[in-house]
Amino acid sequence: MKISIKSCLSGTRSAGGTAVIIDVFRGSNTIISCLMQGAECIFPVAGVEAALKIKTSHPDYLLFGERKGHPPVGFDGDNSPAKASGLKLYKRKIILTTSACTKGILGAEKSKEILVGSFANAGAIINYIRNTNPKKVSLVAIGLDAEKSAAEDDLCAIYIKEKLEGKTPDFKKIKDQVLKSRGSSRLRKLNLDDDLEFCLKLNISRIIPKFDKNSKNIR
């Protein structure tokens, strides 16, 4: 098994084999949280205009997302795993557009399989990869706006890689590093402390979100 760590949108475009899109703050965790609450599926969309167009055609779908940390006008909710964890989403279909995560998912066209990962489901991701034993694994740390590296995504990718290699990374040390990062400071400035707390919980979910290229949704 060859494991590589890739960064940002350019990294997701070159990802092959089993790709894991990692957006700790907050896209990956919002997807995990929605599925934990019973959502039937999530449609990742790159742009706000495209997301609104889908919502117009399917008014029963929920439209979640953010730009610069806030939900655009006309959205039902934002990109918040903490808020999603308190919603009744059983059998609901969700449209999601974010500044980084959804772009990364849609950009991994060369990958045979596209998964969504974070600290929240790291153990499940690791076990799945061990069991399926793909020849190639691409851990994509999507970063800020899918353009600049982000410590939380880089450290999560390293954590998963080291666990797959049989090493024992110190999560407490990693968490302390993330809490000192620019990404954490950004969430605090946006008064998103609940999301910050949610995003730094380890192995709280066994859900492995998978993107289906044919149906264009995550389940």
Image (cartoon, rainbow, N blue to C red):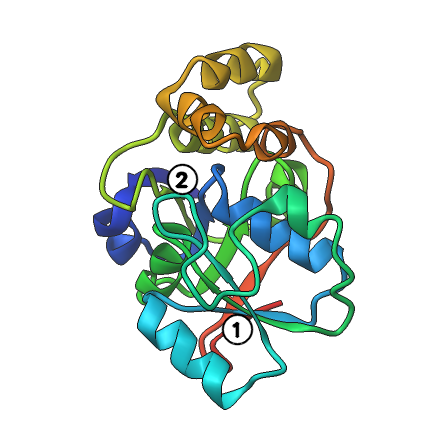
- Residue at 57%, 46% in the rendered image: 80
The secondary element bearing badge 2 is classed as: strand
Q: Which element carries disc 1, helix, strand or loop?
A: strand
- Mark 2 and mark 1 in contact (Cβ < 8 Å)? no
Residue 128 lies, in percent from the top left, at 63, 49
Of 91 and 175, nearer the camera is: 91
Name the amino acid type tagged 2: Ile
In the rendered view, tell whether residue 23 sits above or below residue 198. below
| Residue highlighted by disc 1 | 217
Q: Position of residue 149 (x, y in %)?
A: 28, 32
Q: Mark 2 highlights which residue?
A: 3
Q: Residues within 10 Å of mark 1 (few under 14, many from 20)?
A: some
**Which residue sits at x=47%, y=85%?**
56
Identity of the residue drawn at 48% across and 30% down: 156
Looking at the rendered image, the quarter that the C terminus falls into is bottom right
Q: 203 and 131: which one is in front?
A: 203
Q: Amino acid at mark 1?
A: Asn
